[in-house]
Amino acid sequence: MDMYFPSGFPMYDPHTDIFTNNLCMAKRLKAYVGGFLQRQDLISLCKYRKPRLTLEECLMWKESFEKLLSSKQGLYAFKAFLVSEFSEENIAFYLACEDYKSTKSAAKMPSKAKRIYEEFIGSEATREVNIDYETRDITQANLKSPMASCFDMAQYRIYILMEKDCYPRFLRSTAYRNLLNQLTVKRAKARSKKAIAARPPCEEEEPK
């Protein structure tokens, strides 16, 4: 079966070492796939999710990272952006911690804490987040007697990382700017139709 590669996609070069070839192709693939995911997810957010996203809500996301996360549509858009950048483990960990803190049954906390640690923090974590060794060690020690606050330090570190790094890049992204443009155009068209509909009907001139 033939495989299609986008125009300009780097093919294997036998004169270059395998590591360089693989690294080059991985970077380009990330750019192509990431761009596709970013366009598709944010456009679908604008068109298909309910309740429909408004221009006011989209503009509100620029006010603060907290307001972005407090918006269901904003959280969805931010997650889609991180998926497009292959760094969704940060928001996934943050949300897992929020879910963990809302656990009502103390008996369930040890297993949930262990699962979160193994997925995001442990040495063999499948979606390892970027935290310092001190935070990692403290979190590991907290697992000995899991409480609602045992991931607080690690969650805070990831929140600050997203606020200082991922959030500004999201606001500067082509996907977010395109979404704003779409909603602005949609608003202008709606106002134009409303203005036309509000006009009084033209009275026909009486024949002389």
Image (cartoon, rainbow, N blue to C red):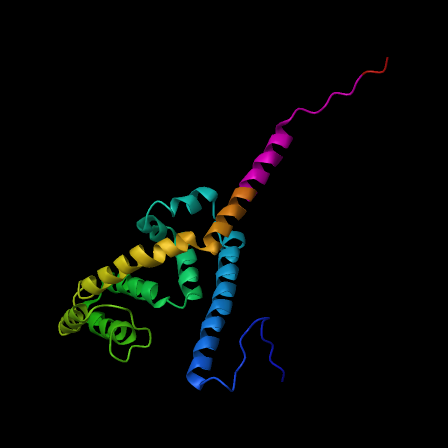
Left-right relation of 63 to 84: left
Front residue of 108/53: it is 53
Q: Can residue 190 be seen in the rendering of this structure?
A: yes
User: Is residue 188 within the magenta segment?
Assistant: yes
Vertically, is 89 above or below 58? Answer: below
- Residue 113, located in which quarter of the rendered image? bottom left
Left-right relation of 85 to 107: right
Q: Residue drawn 60% across and 80% down?
A: 3
- Residue 152, located in which quarter of the rendered image? bottom left
Front residue of 19/136: it is 19
Q: Can residue 52 be seen in the rendering of this structure?
A: no
Boundaries of the magenta span: 186-205
Q: Position of residue 16 (x, y in %)?
A: 47, 84
Q: Residue drawn 30% across and 73% down?
A: 128
Q: Residue furthest top?
A: 208
Q: Residue furthest right?
A: 208
Q: Quadrant of the C terminus?
A: top right
Instruction: From the image, give the main secondary structure of the stretch colored magenta.
Output: helix
Left-right relation of 135 to 207: left
Q: Residue drawn 35% across and 55% down?
A: 167
Q: Position of residue 115 (x, y in %)?
A: 27, 74
Front residue of 58/165: it is 165
Q: Position of residue 23 (x, y in %)?
A: 43, 78
User: Is residue 6 within the magenta segment?
Assistant: no
